[in-house]
Amino acid sequence: MSTFAYEGLDQSSAAVRGTVEAPTREEAVRKLRALGHFATEVRATNGTVGNGAVATPTRQRHGRVGRAEVIAVVRQLSDLVSANLPMDRCLTVLVEQTDNSSLRAVLEEVQRQVRGGKPLSDAMGQFPRLFPLLLTSTLSAGEASGQLGNVLERVADHLEWEQNRRSQVVSALMYPAILLTVALGASGFLLTFVVPRIAVIFKDLGQALPTPTQILLHLASFTREFWWTPVVGGVTVWFLGKAYCANRSGKLRVNRALLRLPVVGPLARQVVVGRCIRSLGTMLTGGVPMLFALELAGKAAANLVFEDAFGTAAGEVRHGESLHAALAGTRAFPPIVIHMAAVGEETGSLATMLIRVATSLEREVEMAQRRLITLMEPAVLLFMGMLVGFIVISILLPIFQMNAAIGG
């Protein structure tokens, strides 16, 4: 018999912690569920599990596995569970249908642990880089409530929505990125290979060159001799930025600065709010306790400003405050979120209202992104035209000047 320390939430979403004796960690989790506790962490205090073997984390062998492959697995698992197949049979089908050897190894390990008595959520939780905390936590709530099929379907919808959003943004930015790359490549070619050869001809003329031509020649000389400067500078800035953001206070300042930027800041704020509110609604729909759902929603925001805001709201809710009042007190959320949360609490449909307001915010973000990208395309074309035009005019000016001198 081993002693396990646990932390979690009770049925009223109040934080609980303590110890429980059980032969294995899985049995300890079952005991806690029987007591009505939702465990967020269970660990052996004596360093042993079951028969005295030292508890070691499962080795993650998943290597390179695409996010789309993981989402496909969640969707297939949702369909199989909804068809009332036994869990072992569901996992067997997934293993057989998975082409990625790394992902297949992970699924085989998950199946082995499930056969050993572990809940599916705990088995998947051994691979947090593949299966996000939102997924495993919602699955745990679904297992406790007996609605695993419905929960899997909602989580699959949520993950697919996030993947589609990323794909849309990448596709929309592809054309402006190609234009900008072509513009910079053409300009680099002219400055590196064309202008230096023409510069020799200009020197042989022995006459004063126009100011634009002088600027172009100096720029071409700098590009040839110090082409590595932008590369080294970019890498240096990247490493310094990464080191600065490794500190929580530094990352918090960067996140705040991002939200205060003109044009981009308000858009980034709506993106973050929509993402975390949708995550919160999805988890509440799946039966995750409010306090734990607020904690996970803050992490899903990927922004410390909102992570702290959700942490503050969770503290207020823990002391009996309503969700909409707690969110309003943080001053981080737009009024529509506060009002819809209040309506949801009054009508008993909080999760539905949260998902609805998230959908509304996402539509606004999509329209704003379309307008921004629509403006980016002519801006990039204008920049490319001005850059190439400056180079061409700077080359032609001395020729026109020489022709005028000969004609005069």
Image: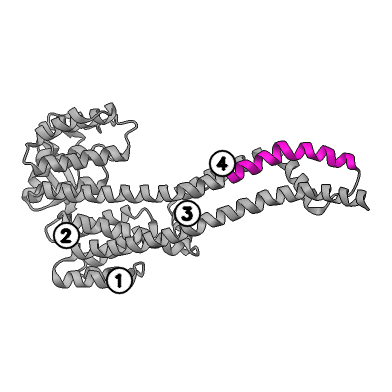
Residue position marked by numbered label 1 in the rendering? 336
- Mark 4 or mark 2, whichever is nearer to me: 4
The circle drawn on residue 235 is 4
The amino acid type found where label 1 is placed reads Ile
Measured in 3D between alpha carbons, the distance from the residue under mark 3 to the one under mark 2, in whole angstroms, is 32 Å
Numbered mark located on residue 13 in the image = 2
Q: Are marks 1 and 3 in contact (CB under 8 Å)?
A: no
Q: CA distance from mark 1 to mark 4?
A: 41 Å
Which residues lie in the magenta part? 182-205
Q: Earlier in the sequence, mark 1 or mark 2?
A: 2
Q: Residues within 10 Å of mark 3 (few under 14, many from 20)?
A: some
User: Can residue 253 be found in the magenta stretch?
Assistant: no
Q: Which secondary structure class fits the magenta region best?
A: helix
- First in sequence, mark 4 or 2: give its number: 2
Q: Residue at x 22, y 38 (%)?
A: 73
Label 3, on which residue?
A: 250
> Mark 1, mark 2: which one is toward the viewer?
1
Q: Do callouts 4 and 2 mark residues in contact (Cβ within 8 Å)?
A: no
